Image (cartoon, rainbow, N blue to C red):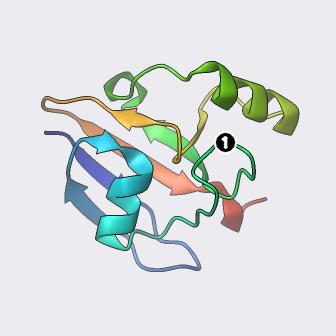
């Protein structure tokens, strides 16, 4: 399974975990430094910038694309509540956007 490396944020220190599946669940289980609330692409509190390894995430669905478009987000941004980490080896580096918004 991929390693997900979270940059430090106001919510906590940098950390890495090995996991796959819904990114929001990985964040929740690991107490990762990423904020989230709705789990349905409606609030965007979980917006993250993918610094490396975007290819290890499933492509965004229409709800996520719509919200990111409304935000004017760059293509490197994803919503943790919608992003799904693929199985297999790899490294994903990300940063919670809330610290930089």
Q: Position of residue 30 (x, y in %)?
A: 30, 69
Residue at 55% x, 23% y is: 60
Task: Indicate left or right for 53 with 59 as reference.
Answer: left
Q: Position of residue 65 (x, y in %)?
A: 69, 24
Q: Position of residue 59 (x, y in %)?
A: 48, 19
Q: Quadrant of residue 100?
A: bottom right
Task: Indicate left or right for 33 with 36 as reference.
Answer: left
Q: Return the residue nearer the eye: 93 or 88.
A: 88
Residue behind mark 1: 41
Task: Indicate left or right for 2 with 61 as reference.
Answer: left
Q: Return the residue nearer the eye: 28 or 8.
A: 28
Residue at 41% x, 78% y is: 13
Q: Is residue 6 above or below residue 9?
A: above
Quadrant for the C terminus in the image: bottom right
Residue at 38% x, 70% y is: 14
Q: Quadrant of residue 71?
A: top right
Question: What is the secondary structure assignment of the residue under circle 1?
Answer: loop
Residue at 86% x, 33% y is: 70
Q: Position of residue 18 (x, y in %)?
A: 17, 52
Q: How many C-alpha atoms fall within 10 Å of the one at disc 1: few (<14), some, or many (≥20)?
A: many
Q: Quadrant of residue 79?
A: top right
Task: Indicate left or right for 39 with 16 as reference.
Answer: right
> How many numbered discs?
1
Quadrant for the N terminus in the image: top left
């Amino acid at each position: 399974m991929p390693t997900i490396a979270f940059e430090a944020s106001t919510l906590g220190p940098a950390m890495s975990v090995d996991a796959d599946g819904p990114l929001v669940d990985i964040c929740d289980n690991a107490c990762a430094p990423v904020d989230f609330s709705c789990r349905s692409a409606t609030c965007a509190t979980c917006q993250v910038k993918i610094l490396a390894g975007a290819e290890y995430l499933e492509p965004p669905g229409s709800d996520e694309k719509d919200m990111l478009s409304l935000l004017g987000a760059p293509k490197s941004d994803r919503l943790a509540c919608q992003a799904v980490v693929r199985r297999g080896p790899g490294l994903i580096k990300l940063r919670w956007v809330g610290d930089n918004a």
